[in-house]
Image: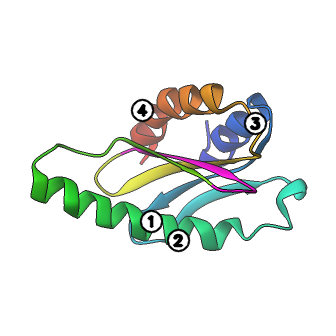
Amino acid sequence: MSFRAQLEAVVEQVDGALGCTIMGFDGIAVESHQLPAADDLDLSGAWVEFANVLNQLKQTSSALRTGQVNELSINAERVIAVIRSVSSEYFLALALRPNGNLGKGRYLLRVTAPKVLAEL
């Protein structure tokens, strides 16, 4: 299954989902899928900024010896972002409306991550 098809499947299965991406920690997207309903949000810019936050968390986690950060959730007024590490170089991120199904989104990122890793 292509990266695009995997992202589309995640977005289609999660109520309130707006978009999903596979991105490197360098802020370069491998593939993204965004619904027209999210056109009022700059998700691509948000993903890049979240990559910066993740890099800082990776450094902090390493310094504190707490182990790899596997998942991060950012809850804002207009969007919830769930970010799941795929490898030391890539992550999956899902944007949801605040009333979206966060639990299902987290679950689908967790089961999709190994599939994405196998394709990378």
Question: Is label 1 or label 4 in front?
Answer: 1
Give the alpha-carbon distance from disc 3 to disc 1, as whole Å: 22 Å
Residue range highlighted in magenta: 76-86
Image position of 58 (left or right of 119): left
- Which residue is located at x 47 percent, y 71 percent? 27
- Give the amino acid type for the residue marked by disc 2 in the picture: Val
Q: Answer with mark 4 or mark 2, whichever residue precedes in sequence.
A: 2
Amino acid type at circle 3 is Gly
Separation (CA) of disc 3 from disc 2: 22 Å
Q: Name the residue under label 3.
A: 100
Q: Residue furthest right?
A: 37
Q: Label 2: which residue?
A: 48
Indicate which disc, 3 or 2, sits on the residue closer to the N terminus.
2
Name the kind of residue labelled 1 in the image: Ala
Question: Mark 4 = which residue?
Answer: 114
Query: Is 80 colored magenta in this rendering?
Result: yes
User: Mark 4 or mark 3, which is nearer the start of the sequence?
Assistant: 3
Query: In x, y percent, where is residue 52?
Result: 41, 71
**Tag shown at residue 51:** 1
Q: What element carries label 3?
A: loop
Q: Where is residue 77 in the image (x, y as percent from the top left)?
A: 72, 56
